[in-house]
Image: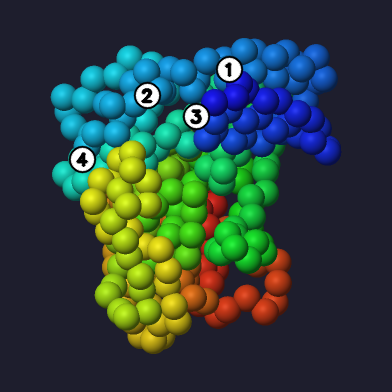
């Protein structure tokens, strides 16, 4: 495995990669503070993958009250997944968001107005008082168009956005094109998006599933069936699948584990806790979520 790679992108962004970790980072603020934050975050970044590999056996096992890990990223992964331990979940469900959160802390300092750490679509945010960031919603990773957006205000508790679905980098038990979740951290959003996406589920001949271990021999999902293809579904069946996922999202919202969720499948949408979503294109389907969580009162 090659070592960590760092390169500059346009508009002050940076791209950092180490093995499967793939970050795009951008920060705004005092140039000295931004440069110092990048330097401190990079020093930390170079050690993260090795720490995770050291504890990989525990991180690939089903999470439970007895799960013992030591590294800060690993601890964050376990903590984010523990609320879902009554079902099957491993800490790997929160790995991307947890790494993003780890890097975010270096930018949440004086002199930096706002910043984001995007780990393959799982995003940790820093917003100083009075600041906002606009985040786009892409329902289909293989046809990357922004089908909605949300303006996140510093007064809102949202500091993490994550997306899961059968087309993503990780395997999914469900058939959602995408499930985008807002939460207080990227790790919490990542775990919840996985759980909700798994619940967007129906059986139909157009859906193809394979054992995870046949696709990746070291998958934490073992022999569980994961989705590899979803053909055109009857409208009512797609709606039923979305309704199952939306019911789980509503439950998590009621448990205060998420702050909002939008679920997409074949042109249909469902949402939970929505207030503030804007649609950039008039031709968006009528079923799109109308809003996302609004900033809480100052």
Is residue 279 shown above or below 224?
below
List x then y, in percent, for residue 296.
51, 44
Q: Is residue 104 above or below residue 92?
A: above
**CA distance separating discs 2 and 1:** 16 Å
Residue drawn at x 46%, y 71% is 265
Which quadrant holds the C terminus? Answer: top right
Q: Nearer the viewer, mark 1 or mark 4?
A: 1
Q: Label 1: which residue?
A: 46
Image coordinates of residue 78 in percent, x first then y, are: 31, 29
- Here the colouring is rainbow
Label 1: state its secondary structure. helix
**For marks 3 and 1 on the same chain, the one whose residue lies earlier in the sequence:** 1
Decide which of 6, 187 is in the foreground and name it.
6
> Is label 2 or label 1 in front?
1
Camera-nearest label, 3 or 1: 1
In this figure, which residue is indicated by the disc labeled 3?
Answer: 99
Which numbered disc, 2 or 1, marks the residue that appears first in the sequence?
1
The mark nearer the N terminus, 1 or 4, is 1
- For disc 4, the marked residue is 85
Which residue is denoted by mark 2 in the rendering? Answer: 74
Residue 178 appears left or right of 113:
left
């Amino acid at each position: 495995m090659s070592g960590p790679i760092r390169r500059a992108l346009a508009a002050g962004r940076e791209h950092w990669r180490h093995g499967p970790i793939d970050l795009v980072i951008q920060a705004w603020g005092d140039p000295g503070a931004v440069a110092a934050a990048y330097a401190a975050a990079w020093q930390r970044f170079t050690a993260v993958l090795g720490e995770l590999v050291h504890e990989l056996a525990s991180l690939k096992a089903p999470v439970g009250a007895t799960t013992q890990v030591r590294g800060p990223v690993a601890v964050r992964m376990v903590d984010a997944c523990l609320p879902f331990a009554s079902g099957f979940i491993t800490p790997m469900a929160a790995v991307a968001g947890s790494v993003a959160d780890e890097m975010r802390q270096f930018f949440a300092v004086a002199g930096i107005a706002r910043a984001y750490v995007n780990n393959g679509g799982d995003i940790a945010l820093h917003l100083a008082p009075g600041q906002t960031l606009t985040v786009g919603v892409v329902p289909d990773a293989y046809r990357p168009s922004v089908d909605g957006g949300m303006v996140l205000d510093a007064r809102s508790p949202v500091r993490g956005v994550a997306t899961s679905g059968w087309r993503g980098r990780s395997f999914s038990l469900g058939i959602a094109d995408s499930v985008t979740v807002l939460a207080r951290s990227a790790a919490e959003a990542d775990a919840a998006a996985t759980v909700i996406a798994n619940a967007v589920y129906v059986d139909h001949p157009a859906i193809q599933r394979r054992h995870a271990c046949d696709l990746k021999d070291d998958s934490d999902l073992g022999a569980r069936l994961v989705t590899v293809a979803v053909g055109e579904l009857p409208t009512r069946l797609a709606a039923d699948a979305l309704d199952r996922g939306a019911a789980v999202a509503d439950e998590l919202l009621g448990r205060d584990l998420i702050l909002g969720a939008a679920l997409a499948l074949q042109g249909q949408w469902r949402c939970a806790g929505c207030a503030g979503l804007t649609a950039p294109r008039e031709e968006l389907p009528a079923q799109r979520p109308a809003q996302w969580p609004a900033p809480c009162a100052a």
